[in-house]
Image (cartoon, rainbow, N blue to C red):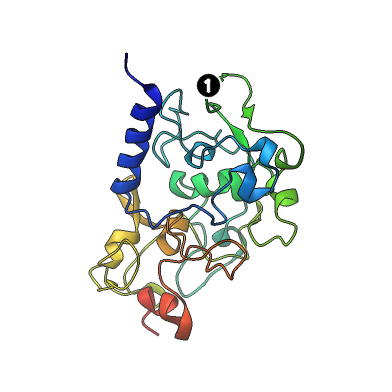
Amino acid sequence: MINMRIVIGILLTGFVSLWGVGGIANTPHDLSATVWTGVATEDNGELCVYCHTPHAANSSFTGAPIWNKSTPTSTFTLYGTTIASTTAGLAGDNATVNAPSMACLSCHDGVSAVNSVVNAPGTGLATADADAFIGTGAQALSAIAADASGASVIGTNLSNDHPVSIAYTEGKAGLRLKSYNISTWVGATTIQDILRTTGGVDYVECGSCHDPHNGADTKGTGSVAFLRVLNTGSVLCLGCHDK
């Protein structure tokens, strides 16, 4: 008889290798109960399940593989929505959030519960009408309540954040050529590597600056927000903008 726990472990290990993961254990993206809430009785013993599941995934979601979260239904206000005109010509360019950034907003929208998943761990609890919840009590919280500091709560108003789902147009706002070398960044050699293509167009998304699997710091010891490169001396900004 095939041991499904071993099979699942192999699948997730393969997924980790594919994406060049730096590790999420003991980082803010480690949502297992003993790390996130400190309540051992709520620990399900898994890390990946809060975002990914090997079975019964959200097949309608294209922003990330085997996605274990519902697609956010909130209305988002993007940067270009409220800016009449800019040197980058952003107005009207990004009317909606593309799937790659929507994956991040599945937790960071300030509405979605961090422990709300499509398919629960263990024997599974796939449901078409409502998400399953992992754990109870302190962990059954929205992203807002889960992080009182607000550091991980982006919310639905994205007009005060760096534009996402915005087309990367070389030359606008001093944007460098997509072939520009950024080999010091995690998971990239050139700018092209950090862009995400939707409908044949290369976009800047949340994952362009952040690698969700690159746990550079242990939670609570000065997280660098999963940045692909530290922004000391504005290195992160200057990676794309020739200023």
Name the quadrant containing residue 10: top left
Which residue is depicted at the point 46% across and 36% down? Answer: 52
Please tell me which residue lies in front, 228 or 140: 140
Name the quadrant containing residue 41: top right
- Element type at marker 1? loop
Please tell me which residue lies in front, 159 or 20: 20
Does residue 4 lie above or below 162 as drawn?
A: above
Local packing at callout 1 (Cα closer than 10 Å; few below 14, some 14-19, many 20+) is few
Which residue is depicted at the point 22% across and 69% down? Answer: 179
Does residue 73 lie above or below 90 as drawn?
A: above
Q: On the picture, is 147 further left or further right than 63?
A: right
State the image coordinates of residue 139 (x, y, percent, origin top left).
Answer: 70, 41
Q: Quadrant of the C terminus?
A: bottom left
Which residue is depicted at the point 58% across and 67% down? Answer: 84
Which residue is depicted at the point 52% across and 69% down? Answer: 224
Residue under circle 1?
A: 124
Q: Quadrant of the N terminus?
A: top left
